[in-house]
Amino acid sequence: MVTSRAFNLGVSAAVSVAILLGIFTIGGPNAARRDMFDLRRYENLTQIAAALHCANWRILQPQLPEKLDLESIRAYCGGIEIQADVLVDNETNVPYDYTRLNETAFSVCAVFYDAEKAMRLNYQGYPRWNATFNPDTGCITGRIR
Amino acid sequence: MQAKDSVRQFVRDALLADRSREEIRKGLRQAGWSTNEIDNALAQYARIDFSPPIPAPRPQFTARDVFIYAVQFTALAYTAIYLINLVHALLDLWMPDAADFPDLELRATMRLRWAIATLVVAAPVYLWMSRFAHSRVEKNAMSRRSPVRKYLTYLTLFVTAMIFLGDAIFLIYGFLEGSATLRFVLKATTVGAVTLAIFVFYLRDVEYLRGDQ
């Protein structure tokens, strides 16, 4: 039946064009993997900022650590714990770049493929805890009070 | 005795009495039987000159048919749903709206990947099963009258008609609500185009099957 052939041809064409447009728009598996790593970087920076914010700062009056490792974070805010893999880049295994700006302010930076996209794609929205993310530098800067 | 059985018995008696099918048809029509009922009653007996009349083979409800057509129509449903989903996700990414939630890009990207994955599997399955079913029908006239095929075709017509009407209602509601942006209209048009294409194709298929009886 000619109609059946035409319908199947139409289905094939519509599906093929839609799939190609989809891949062209969001990129292939490599782009997806890059997005995934960027999302992890963004989440890690947000978690680090949350840990450094130190919810009990009024009581503990903490001083920001000089360097960022598990020991110093634990000592910093009354034994607060953080996962070890949060402190390093999941793709390169290089620790994030932490800078103590002064007694109350810090910045944590990562090298992103597309920091702006990572910020847009993040589930939890923008960072809280007195921290802001700058997609141009790939850094979260925050203060503890 | 049901009406169906009585007309069947009448056709048998008439054929035994050497009345032609046209005469039987004419008589039944004058008595008030519908064309469909007359066709069904006459189709009970083979079109060969033999006395007593030989019952025609009846379409069977077979497990094989259930498998073939259930897979074909399920694959069609998946293909249609995820084709619409893919186009909607593309429209979300191409035409962002100021009123969108912040995570729309992530959700649209995930929907798009899921739709691509589903279409890569479902569309070839539909096309292959459709060709397979079609070649069976071409080879064997009985397959053409498969009750499974018939019911699933009518179910498809019903579902697509309901979606098409729902889409039209949704479109009008969008206009009244003031949310009918270009993206909204394009999304509704996609749903309408896909369901209408399926509806028209299977309506023609039904007519083709009816013409064959």
Image (spheres, coloured by chain):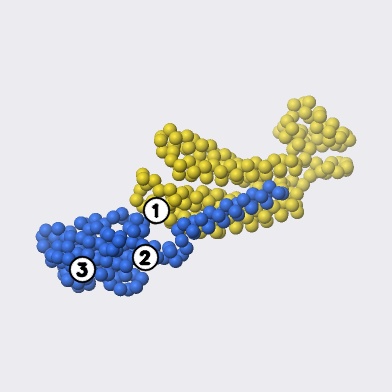
Chain colours: A blue, B yellow
Indicate the chain on which mark 3 is placed. Answer: A
Give the Cα separation between the discs numbered 3 and 1.
Answer: 32 Å
**Distance between the Cα atoms at labels 3 and 2?**
21 Å
Tell me if mark 1 has few (under 14), some (14-19) or many (20+) residues whose alpha carbon lies within 10 angstroms of its own: many
- For residue A113, the mark is 2
Whether residue B165 is situated above or below residue B86 in the rendered picture: above
Left or right? Give the position of B136 relative to B45: left
Q: Please provide percent x and percent y for residue B104.
A: 38, 51
Q: Which mark is residue A121?
A: none
In this view, the mark in front (3 or 1): 3
**Do marks 3 and 1 share a chain?**
no
10 Å crowding of disc 3: few (<14), some (14-19), many (20+): some
Mark 2, Cα crowd under 10 Å, few <14 / some 14-19 / many 20+, is some
Q: Nearer the viewer, residue B168 or B45?
A: B168
- Residue B20: which quarter of the image? top right
Question: Which marked residue is nearer to the observer: mark 2 or mark 1?
Answer: 2
Residue that numbered label 3 is attached to:
A99
Q: Dot 2 lies on which element?
A: loop
Q: Residue at x 53, y 56 (%)?
A: A19
Q: Earlier in the sequence, mark 3 or mark 2?
A: 3
Looking at the image, the residue that sits furthest to the front is: A136
Q: Mark 1 highlights which residue? A: B105
On screen, residue A124 versus residue A10, left or right, reads left
Would residue A139 appear left or right of B127 to someone viewing this image? left
For mark 1, name the chain: B
Q: Position of residue B2 (x, y in %)?
A: 71, 33
Label 3 sits on what residue type?
Thr
In the rendered structure, the residue with mark 2 lies on which chain? A
Question: Which quadrant holds the N terminus of chain B?
Answer: top right
Q: Nearer the viewer, residue A68 or B93?
A: B93
Image quadrant assignment for residue A118? bottom left
| Residue type marked 2 | Tyr
